[in-house]
Amino acid sequence: MNFRSYSISILVLFFFSTQLTAQSAQKPREVGLQFSSLDFDGGSGFSAFYKKQLKENVYRRIRLFSGGLSFSSTEETFIFNLNAGIAIGREKRKSLDPKLVFYQGPEFSAGFSVSAIDEDEMRFSIKPAFGWVFGLQHNFNERWAVNLETIPGASISVESFSEGESVFSFNAGFNNLVSLGLVRKF
């Protein structure tokens, strides 16, 4: 074998081995929607999440959530409400049987809300929180799953009103009783 064919063989082998390594190194990920209530009058609490495996049985989770969006208007009054937020955490998983997984871990979140009644009255609040996620996930197959989870925790809320008044509050307990989620794994 001459030097040129040997070099080409090494390059081809190197190219294919790096391609195989890159494909096998991709970590499992999940996306989904969770619902903490189903109220078709606009009061539903829901979230969308993204999870990526960091190492064996450990996932990073990012969750975008909404407590609701509503507005109403009459000839004399306009009312607008928006509640939303973002959360990031880490969950550790333990397999209970071939299809059922228990997961738990810390989650930090920041929520905000805006309320307005006409142009006269406006309220803005920010709510940083810390919670501990507890969940069960049933895997139907390698692509689809459902989960149930709850997040007990504590939060601080700071509300500011258009009149210049502010209110500070502390809450602890369950921020949602139980959420039901639909999961797509890839």
Image: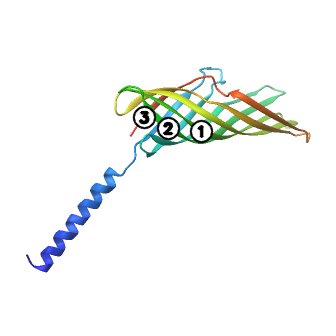
Mark 3 element type = strand
- The color scheme shown is rainbow
Q: Which mark is residue 106?
A: 1
Residue 22 screen position, x and y as percent: 33, 56
Mark 1 element type = strand
Q: Residues within 10 Å of mark 3 (few under 14, many from 20)?
A: some
Quarter occupied by residue 151: top right
Circle 1: residue type: Pro
Q: Is residue 78 above or below residue 59?
A: above
Q: Is residue 70 above or below residue 109?
A: above
Q: Give the number of the mark in front: 2 or 3.
A: 2
Residue 15 screen position, x and y as percent: 25, 64
Q: Earlier in the sequence, mark 2 or mark 1?
A: 2
Q: Give the number of the mark in front: 3 or 1.
A: 1
Mark 3–mark 1 CB contact (< 8 Å): no
Circle 3: residue type: Arg
In three-dimensional space, the C-alpha distance between marks 3 and 1, rounded to whole angstroms, equals 22 Å
Q: Residues within 10 Å of mark 2 (few under 14, many from 20)?
A: some
- Which residue is denoted by mark 3 in the rendering? 184
Q: Nearer the viewer, residue 162 or 93?
A: 93
- Which residue is denoted by mark 2 in the rendering? 92
Residue 170 screen position, x and y as percent: 79, 33
Q: Earlier in the sequence, mark 2 or mark 3?
A: 2
